[in-house]
């Protein structure tokens, strides 16, 4: 078995040449990240610049800076020792000359030749920004060079200057800019890094993607070379290698298409499992909160433009960022990318382990789905920030799924343990998210519009990643900045529906009954003055995720249809419906035809057993039982946040052979279902088969409910994802 390694240029290749966005490559990037494939950034950019992109891309692998000037390897990345030095928190393999020497030679050659040429050191950050289209902050990082000098000619290219560089025993290359460098290039760095990967893994397969002359050495060093089309539909004519692939599309879209095709060819041993993962990862990419914020928000000429509205920053004395949810850290990272040190204060509350490396906005971690003391303490600090906000304050609130349990402030007279017990009772009873939130809002000092009330009279903009069917603003995150249409009577009706009125903590029952009698303040309604200065904008949800999944099916040559974007109810009932849909679809298909059914929503599990699991694992296991012995069917069911119930799994993948194989191994699926113990089932099943039916992605940084993917093949062959 071989390991796949990807080397990539950035500007004009993985990043759009004009906007520096990687959005067009998101489906392939998600597949790469989920598969743990090393993605090596190999660029003319500086270490400081590349560190920013590593954060944006969730990248923890080695990288190559300044056209091969140095290889930066995280400590402990390889399991063996190799020649390197310690520098800036990395194991550094130094290949280039020091920048001071490069710069000295640049000045000498310029004076000798009389060339009209300027290096980055001759320019201010503002001049570099104007030249490149970078922001002022990014231009500052671009000037922090260690191994080569980026330069431009004032007028036409002076060939005499380039000849003088070569005569001095130095080298030049060209990407977006010209570069003066020593005896190094991207190819030498790639060869060294590949040798380390071979020591680590044995056999490796490599691909390199670039668009300019400085990428040629890298493309020579890899197994598959890909030349990326420029935005004007041209290619760099100086690059011509045997067997080289030229992309059909330009920039990151071409990168995406080529990487997906290459990965599909590399994973022929498990094509259907990889197909399920490719479709799921495309859906995740479309719901990435970082990219969703950058798509919805523009910062130009000291103005924020959000969904058609304009907010001149000169009108505000302070900018404050608050929020809560599983996806909020990625949202905050995007806001910092846009506004940087213009943010005066910020605090978000995230689920344990769902943080990002933020520089301005503070993060508090707390538990989910049952609220904890850390969430209470964090919410108290958020409220202090909002109470201090005046009418010259712009408050940006970031909300996503999970905020109901993370943004926690019980009303007076209710203790945290009361809310914890009430939440547990409702979850175990199988209450829907809307029902659960109707109760939680009436026990909270921040939910049901009360966070907006705390921010008033500040201008409040709330950016929302929706995890609720239909995107109702008053249900997502329990609607802390939206008017609430529910009442104390509605909350009590939920408890009556599930027969919990006698099991509730006494303080909760007394408070809700007092509220129904008019003795406690209702949640915020539409006519409250604070709503006049509040704007809620949904920037991502299940619709975008399913649309991207369907688009990915098309790229993979699969006919597909979305059968529901609002799947709900008991997980086992949903599995039965999906199995029926799969059987009907198979019956209508032609021989050797392949199709895909897509579904999204959020089911529930009425807990009656003592096992461990989550709604997606339970749905997948129930689907395996419903389709037992059915050839040509496989399914993935997973939470887009990377977690499923109180487990470390996102969900599971099954097929028509799963139930029979399990029974041969002494694992009875129905017994595990009856005990709500799907997690244990998949643990034991994978251990016995050596497979990977259990889907464990880790935190994805987003949360737009759950996705089910049903892959169908009419050729009559059982698809084995185990």
Image: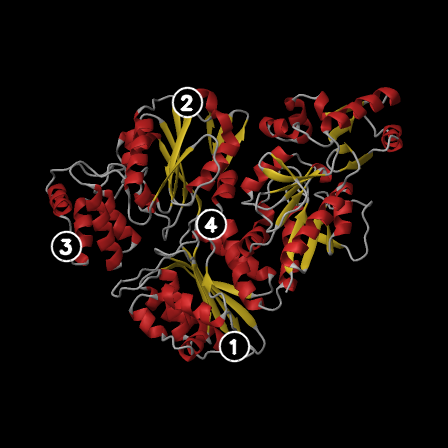
Residue 654: percent from left, percent from top: 45, 69
**Mark 2 residue element:** strand
How far is the residue under mark 3 from the one under mark 4?
36 Å
Question: Is residue 63 toward the left or the right of residue 427 in the image?
Answer: right
Label 1: state its secondary structure.
loop
* Dot placed on the residue nearer the N-terminal end, 4 or 1: 4
Please say which color scheme the image uses: secondary structure
Q: Position of residue 660 (x, y in %)?
A: 43, 78
Q: Is residue 154 visible?
A: no
The alpha-carbon separation of the residues under discs 4 and 1 comes to 31 Å
Mark 4 or mark 3, which is nearer the start of the sequence?
Answer: 3
Q: Is residue 208 visible?
A: yes
Q: Nearer the viewer, mark 2 or mark 4?
A: 4
- Residue 215, by quadrant, is top right
**Residue highlighted by disc 4:** 700
Rendering quarter of residue 443? top left
**Given this view, does label 1 or label 2 mark the residue nearer the observer?**
1
Residue under numbered circle 3: 503
Residue 657: give its label: none
92 and 610: which is toward the camera = 92
Residue 60 position, x and y percent, is: 56, 45
- Which quadrant of the rendered structure holds the N terminus? bottom right
The residue to which callout 2 is attached is 318
The image's mark for residue 718 is: 1
Left or right of 101? Residue 65 is: left
State the image coordinates of residue 105 (x, y, percent, origin top left).
80, 25
Mark before the other along the chain sequence, 3 or 1? 3
Q: Earlier in the sequence, mark 1 or mark 2?
A: 2
């Amino acid at each position: 078995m071989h390991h796949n390694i990807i080397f990539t240029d950035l500007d004009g290749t993985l990043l759009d040449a004009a906007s520096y966005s990687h959005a067009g490559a998101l489906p392939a990037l998600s597949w790469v990240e989920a598969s743990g494939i090393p993605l090596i950034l190999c660029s003319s950019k500086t270490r400081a610049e590349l560190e920013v992109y590593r954060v944006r891309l969730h990248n923890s692998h080695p990288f190559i800076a300044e056209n091969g000037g140095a290889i930066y390897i995280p400590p402990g990345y390889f399991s063996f020792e190799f020649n390197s030095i310690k520098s800036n928190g990395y194991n550094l393999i130094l290949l280039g000359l020091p920048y001071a020497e490069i710069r000295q030679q640049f000045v000498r050659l310029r004076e000798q030749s009389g060339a009209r040429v300027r290096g980055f050191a001759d320019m201010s950050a503002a001049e570099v920004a104007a030249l490149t289209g970078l922001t002022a902050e990014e231009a500052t990082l671009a000037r922090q060079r260690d191994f080569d000098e980026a330069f431009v000619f004032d007028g036409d290219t002076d060939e005499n200057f380039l000849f003088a560089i070569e005569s001095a025993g130095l080298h030049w290359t060209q990407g977006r800019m010209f570069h003066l460098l020593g005896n190094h290039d991207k190819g030498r760095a790639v060869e060294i890094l590949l040798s380390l990967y071979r020591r680590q893994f044995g056999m490796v397969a490599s691909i390199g993607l670039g668009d300019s002359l400085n990428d040629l050495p890298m493309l020579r060093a890899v197994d598959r070379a890909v030349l990326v089309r420029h935005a004007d539909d041209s290619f760099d004519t100086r690059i011509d290698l045997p067997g080289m692939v030229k992309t059909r599309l330009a920039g990151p879209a071409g990168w995406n298409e080529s990487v997906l095709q290459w990965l599909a060819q590399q994973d022929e041993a498990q094509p259907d499992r990889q197909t399920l993962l490719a479709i799921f990862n495309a859906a995740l990419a479309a719901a990435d909160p970082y990219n969703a914020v950058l798509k919805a928000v523009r910062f130009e000429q000291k103005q924020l433009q959000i969904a058609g509205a304009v907010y001149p920053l000169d009108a505000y004395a302070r900018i404050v960022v608050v929020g809560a949810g599983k996806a909020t850290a990625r949202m905050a990272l995007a806001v910092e990318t846009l506004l940087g040190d213009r943010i005066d204060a910020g605090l978000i509350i995230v689920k344990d382990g769902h943080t990002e490396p933020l520089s301005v906005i503070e993060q508090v971690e707390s538990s989910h789905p049952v609220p904890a003391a850390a969430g209470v303490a964090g919410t108290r600090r958020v409220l202090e920030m909002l109470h201090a906000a005046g009418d010259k304050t712009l408050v940006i609130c970031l909300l996503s799924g999970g905020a109901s349990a993370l943004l926690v402030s019980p009303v007076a007279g209710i203790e945290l343990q009361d809310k914890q017990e009430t939440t547990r009772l409702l979850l175990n009873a199988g209450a829907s998210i809307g029902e659960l939130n109707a109760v939680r809002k009436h026990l909270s000092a921040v939910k049901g519009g009360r966070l907006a009330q705390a921010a008033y009279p500040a201008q409040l903009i709330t950016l929302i990643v929706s995890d609720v069917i239909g995107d109702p603003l008053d249900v997502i995150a329990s609607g802390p900045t939206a008017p609430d249409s529910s009442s104390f009577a509605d909350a009590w009706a939920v408890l009556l529906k599930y027969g919990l009125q006698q099991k509730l903590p006494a303080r909760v029952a007394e408070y809700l009954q007092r509220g129904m009698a008019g003795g406690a303040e209702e949640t915020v309604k539409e006519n409250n003055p604070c709503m006049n200065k509040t704007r809620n904008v949904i920037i991502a949800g299940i619709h975008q995720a399913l649309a991207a999944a369907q688009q990915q099916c098309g790229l993979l040559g699969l006919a597909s249809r979305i059968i529901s974007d609002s799947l709900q109810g008991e997980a086992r009932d949903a599995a039965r419906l999906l199995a029926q849909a799969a059987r009907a679809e198979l019956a209508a298909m032609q021989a050797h035809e392949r199709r895909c059914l897509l579904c999204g929503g959020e089911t529930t599990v009425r807990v009656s057993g003592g096992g461990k699991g989550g709604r997606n694992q339970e749905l997948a296991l129930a689907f395996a039982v419903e389709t037992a012995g059915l050839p040509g069917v496989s399914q993935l069911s997973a939470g887009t946040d990377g977690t499923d119930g109180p487990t470390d799994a996102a969900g599971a993948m099954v097929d028509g052979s799963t139930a029979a194989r399990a029974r041969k191994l002494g694992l009875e699926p129905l017994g595990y279902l009856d005990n709500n113990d799907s997690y244990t089932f998949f643990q034991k099943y994978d251990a016995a088969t050596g497979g990977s039916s259990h889907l464990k992605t880790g935190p994805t940084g987003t949360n737009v409910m759950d996705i089910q993917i049903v892959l169908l093949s009419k050729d009559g062959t059982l698809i084995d994802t185990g």
